[in-house]
Amino acid sequence: DAKTTQPNSMESNEEEPVHLPCNHSTISGTDYIHWYRQLPSQGPEYVIHGLTSNVNNRMASLAIAEDRKSSTLILHRATLRDAAVYYCILREDFGNEKLTFGTGTRLTIIP
Amino acid sequence: EAQVTQNPRYLITVTGKKLTVTCSQNMNHEYMSWYRQDPGLGLRQIYYSMNVEVTDKGDVPEGYKVSRKEKRNFPLILESPSPNQTSLYFCASSFSEASGDTEAFFGQGTRLTVV
Protein backbone atom coordinates (compact mmCIF):
# COMPACT_ATOMS: atom_id res chain seq x y z
CA ASP A 1 0.00 0.00 0.00
CA ALA A 2 1.19 3.48 -0.79
CA LYS A 3 2.28 5.45 2.26
CA THR A 4 1.34 8.91 3.37
CA THR A 5 3.25 11.27 5.63
CA GLN A 6 1.60 13.86 7.83
CA PRO A 7 2.77 16.11 10.67
CA ASN A 8 2.00 14.60 14.06
CA SER A 9 0.22 17.67 15.34
CA MET A 10 -0.91 21.16 14.40
CA GLU A 11 -2.57 24.03 16.17
CA SER A 12 -4.85 26.70 14.79
CA ASN A 13 -6.87 29.56 16.13
CA GLU A 14 -10.62 29.34 16.11
CA GLU A 15 -12.32 30.92 13.09
CA GLU A 16 -9.13 30.92 11.04
CA PRO A 17 -8.35 28.69 8.04
CA VAL A 18 -6.36 25.52 8.59
CA HIS A 19 -4.14 23.85 6.01
CA LEU A 20 -3.30 20.23 6.77
CA PRO A 21 -0.55 18.86 4.53
CA CYS A 22 0.00 15.31 3.34
CA ASN A 23 2.82 13.82 1.31
CA HIS A 24 2.26 10.70 -0.79
CA SER A 25 5.23 10.51 -3.13
CA THR A 26 4.63 6.85 -4.09
CA ILE A 27 1.02 7.33 -5.14
CA SER A 28 -0.07 5.31 -8.16
CA GLY A 29 -2.24 6.55 -10.97
CA THR A 30 -5.36 4.78 -9.71
CA ASP A 31 -5.11 5.78 -6.03
CA TYR A 32 -7.73 8.16 -4.72
CA ILE A 33 -6.71 10.58 -1.96
CA HIS A 34 -9.08 10.37 0.98
CA TRP A 35 -9.28 12.36 4.19
CA TYR A 36 -11.03 11.14 7.31
CA ARG A 37 -11.12 12.56 10.77
CA GLN A 38 -11.68 10.99 14.14
CA LEU A 39 -13.17 13.02 16.93
CA PRO A 40 -12.57 11.89 20.51
CA SER A 41 -14.46 8.70 21.37
CA GLN A 42 -15.96 8.38 17.88
CA GLY A 43 -15.42 6.36 14.75
CA PRO A 44 -13.58 7.83 11.76
CA GLU A 45 -15.67 10.22 9.71
CA TYR A 46 -15.30 10.86 5.99
CA VAL A 47 -14.23 14.39 5.10
CA ILE A 48 -13.40 14.54 1.41
CA HIS A 49 -11.66 12.69 -1.42
CA GLY A 50 -10.30 13.32 -4.89
CA LEU A 51 -8.23 11.90 -7.70
CA THR A 52 -6.58 14.71 -9.66
CA SER A 53 -8.62 17.88 -9.46
CA ASN A 54 -9.22 20.06 -6.43
CA VAL A 55 -12.45 19.25 -4.63
CA ASN A 56 -14.83 21.22 -2.44
CA ASN A 57 -17.65 20.09 -0.21
CA ARG A 58 -19.54 21.49 2.75
CA MET A 59 -16.89 20.36 5.20
CA ALA A 60 -13.62 21.24 3.50
CA SER A 61 -11.57 21.68 0.35
CA LEU A 62 -8.91 19.36 -1.00
CA ALA A 63 -6.04 20.80 -2.99
CA ILE A 64 -4.06 18.20 -4.95
CA ALA A 65 -0.63 18.97 -6.35
CA GLU A 66 -0.25 18.69 -10.10
CA ASP A 67 2.11 15.71 -9.76
CA ARG A 68 -0.25 14.21 -7.13
CA LYS A 69 2.63 13.60 -4.72
CA SER A 70 1.10 15.83 -2.08
CA SER A 71 -2.23 17.26 -1.06
CA THR A 72 -3.64 19.73 1.44
CA LEU A 73 -6.87 19.58 3.35
CA ILE A 74 -8.27 23.05 3.92
CA LEU A 75 -10.74 23.85 6.66
CA HIS A 76 -11.91 27.32 5.77
CA ARG A 77 -12.95 28.48 9.21
CA ALA A 78 -11.97 26.20 12.04
CA THR A 79 -14.29 25.73 14.98
CA LEU A 80 -13.71 23.96 18.26
CA ARG A 81 -15.68 21.02 16.86
CA ASP A 82 -12.97 20.52 14.23
CA ALA A 83 -10.48 19.40 16.87
CA ALA A 84 -9.71 15.82 15.86
CA VAL A 85 -7.12 13.50 14.38
CA TYR A 86 -7.08 13.91 10.59
CA TYR A 87 -5.98 11.02 8.41
CA CYS A 88 -4.79 11.28 4.83
CA ILE A 89 -5.28 7.92 3.11
CA LEU A 90 -4.71 6.51 -0.35
CA ARG A 91 -7.50 4.23 -1.43
CA GLU A 92 -7.01 1.78 -4.28
CA ASP A 93 -9.54 1.63 -7.07
CA PHE A 94 -9.68 -2.14 -7.20
CA GLY A 95 -9.64 -5.22 -4.99
CA ASN A 96 -9.79 -4.89 -1.23
CA GLU A 97 -10.92 -1.37 -0.58
CA LYS A 98 -9.26 -1.17 2.77
CA LEU A 99 -8.23 2.15 4.17
CA THR A 100 -4.67 2.08 5.44
CA PHE A 101 -4.60 4.54 8.31
CA GLY A 102 -1.35 6.14 9.37
CA THR A 103 -0.90 8.06 12.61
CA GLY A 104 -2.60 11.18 11.27
CA THR A 105 -2.37 14.80 12.39
CA ARG A 106 -3.83 15.78 15.72
CA LEU A 107 -5.43 19.21 15.19
CA THR A 108 -5.89 21.43 18.22
CA ILE A 109 -8.11 24.48 17.92
CA ILE A 110 -7.27 27.39 20.20
CA PRO A 111 -10.29 29.44 21.32
CA GLU B 1 -30.37 8.40 8.35
CA ALA B 2 -27.44 6.55 6.78
CA GLN B 3 -25.55 4.75 9.48
CA VAL B 4 -23.44 1.82 10.58
CA THR B 5 -24.55 0.42 13.91
CA GLN B 6 -22.35 -1.64 16.16
CA ASN B 7 -23.36 -3.47 19.32
CA PRO B 8 -22.40 -3.53 22.05
CA ARG B 9 -20.52 -0.25 22.51
CA TYR B 10 -18.67 -1.57 25.55
CA LEU B 11 -17.92 -5.14 26.55
CA ILE B 12 -15.85 -6.70 29.29
CA THR B 13 -15.40 -10.44 29.07
CA VAL B 14 -13.18 -13.24 30.34
CA THR B 15 -10.56 -15.16 28.43
CA GLY B 16 -12.02 -17.97 26.36
CA LYS B 17 -15.66 -16.95 26.48
CA LYS B 18 -17.01 -16.71 22.94
CA LEU B 19 -18.47 -13.39 21.92
CA THR B 20 -19.98 -11.69 18.89
CA VAL B 21 -19.91 -8.02 18.00
CA THR B 22 -22.68 -7.14 15.59
CA CYS B 23 -22.49 -4.63 12.74
CA SER B 24 -25.39 -3.51 10.60
CA GLN B 25 -25.63 -0.91 7.82
CA ASN B 26 -28.73 0.57 6.20
CA MET B 27 -27.18 1.87 2.96
CA ASN B 28 -27.25 -1.32 0.87
CA HIS B 29 -23.45 -1.29 0.72
CA GLU B 30 -21.65 -4.24 -0.82
CA TYR B 31 -18.34 -3.74 1.00
CA MET B 32 -17.98 -4.12 4.76
CA SER B 33 -14.93 -4.48 6.94
CA TRP B 34 -13.69 -4.65 10.52
CA TYR B 35 -10.80 -2.68 11.97
CA ARG B 36 -9.16 -2.63 15.35
CA GLN B 37 -7.52 0.46 16.79
CA ASP B 38 -4.66 0.24 19.26
CA PRO B 39 -2.49 3.04 20.67
CA GLY B 40 0.56 3.62 18.52
CA LEU B 41 -0.60 1.15 15.87
CA GLY B 42 -3.50 3.05 14.35
CA LEU B 43 -6.40 1.27 12.68
CA ARG B 44 -5.67 -2.12 11.18
CA GLN B 45 -8.04 -4.17 9.07
CA ILE B 46 -9.12 -7.53 10.48
CA TYR B 47 -11.49 -8.94 7.84
CA TYR B 48 -13.45 -7.61 4.92
CA SER B 49 -16.35 -8.67 2.74
CA MET B 50 -16.93 -7.67 -0.87
CA ASN B 51 -20.52 -8.97 -0.85
CA VAL B 52 -22.80 -11.64 0.62
CA GLU B 53 -20.93 -14.90 1.28
CA VAL B 54 -17.64 -13.30 0.13
CA THR B 55 -15.15 -12.63 2.93
CA ASP B 56 -11.39 -12.45 3.16
CA LYS B 57 -8.63 -11.79 5.65
CA GLY B 58 -7.24 -8.36 6.27
CA ASP B 59 -3.95 -7.58 7.97
CA VAL B 60 -4.63 -9.02 11.44
CA PRO B 61 -7.18 -11.86 11.15
CA GLU B 62 -5.78 -14.27 13.75
CA GLY B 63 -8.30 -15.07 16.48
CA TYR B 64 -11.29 -13.64 14.61
CA LYS B 65 -14.06 -14.97 12.40
CA VAL B 66 -16.68 -13.20 10.34
CA SER B 67 -19.74 -14.11 8.34
CA ARG B 68 -21.81 -12.32 5.70
CA LYS B 69 -25.11 -14.10 5.28
CA GLU B 70 -27.06 -10.92 4.62
CA LYS B 71 -25.95 -7.78 2.87
CA ARG B 72 -26.67 -5.50 5.81
CA ASN B 73 -24.96 -7.52 8.57
CA PHE B 74 -21.32 -8.38 9.17
CA PRO B 75 -20.74 -9.80 12.66
CA LEU B 76 -17.28 -10.20 14.16
CA ILE B 77 -16.84 -13.40 16.15
CA LEU B 78 -14.17 -14.09 18.75
CA GLU B 79 -14.34 -17.83 19.43
CA SER B 80 -11.87 -17.78 22.31
CA PRO B 81 -10.95 -14.21 23.24
CA SER B 82 -7.56 -13.49 24.74
CA PRO B 83 -6.25 -10.39 26.52
CA ASN B 84 -4.31 -9.30 23.42
CA GLN B 85 -7.64 -8.78 21.69
CA THR B 86 -8.47 -5.98 24.09
CA SER B 87 -8.96 -3.10 21.69
CA LEU B 88 -11.33 -0.62 20.11
CA TYR B 89 -13.15 -2.15 17.16
CA PHE B 90 -14.76 -0.38 14.21
CA CYS B 91 -17.00 -1.67 11.48
CA ALA B 92 -17.07 0.16 8.15
CA SER B 93 -19.07 -0.07 4.93
CA SER B 94 -19.07 1.45 1.46
CA PHE B 95 -20.29 0.88 -2.08
CA SER B 96 -18.03 -1.18 -4.30
CA GLU B 97 -18.89 -0.11 -7.82
CA ALA B 98 -15.98 2.31 -8.02
CA SER B 99 -14.08 1.40 -4.91
CA GLY B 100 -11.57 4.19 -4.65
CA ASP B 101 -14.16 6.80 -5.50
CA THR B 102 -16.54 6.05 -2.65
CA GLU B 103 -16.60 7.16 0.93
CA ALA B 104 -16.58 4.74 3.83
CA PHE B 105 -18.95 4.97 6.76
CA PHE B 106 -17.81 3.86 10.19
CA GLY B 107 -19.66 2.68 13.24
CA GLN B 108 -19.24 4.32 16.63
CA GLY B 109 -16.93 1.61 17.85
CA THR B 110 -16.94 -1.24 20.35
CA ARG B 111 -14.51 -1.08 23.23
CA LEU B 112 -13.65 -4.64 24.19
CA THR B 113 -11.74 -5.63 27.29
CA VAL B 114 -10.68 -9.25 27.78
CA VAL B 115 -9.53 -10.13 31.29
Image (spheres, grey):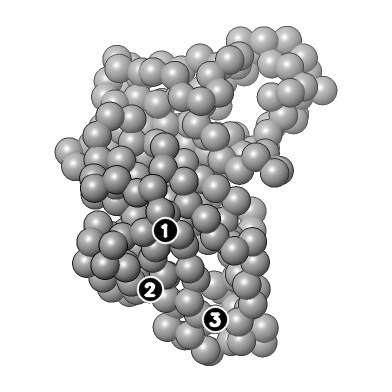
Q: Nearer the viewer, residue A86 or B34?
A: A86
Placement of the C terminus of chain B among the 4 image quadrants: top right
Local crowd size for mark 3, using a 10 Å CA cut-off: few (<14), some (14–19), many (≥20): some
Residue A30 at x, y percent in the picture = 23, 45
With respect to residue B24, does B13 lie above or below?
A: above
Residue type (three-letter) at the residue carrying disc 1: Trp
Secondary structure found at label 2: loop
Chain letter of disc 3?
A
Q: Nearer the viewer, residue B3 or A42?
A: A42
Secondary structure found at label 1: strand
Which residue matches tag 2?
A60
Which residue matches tag 3?
A79
| Disc number lying in front (3 or 2) | 2
Which residue matches tag 1?
A35
In the image, A52: left or right of B81?
Answer: left
Q: Residue furthest left?
A: B97
Residue that appears at 22% across and 67% down:
A53
Dot 1 or dot 2, earlier in sequence: 1
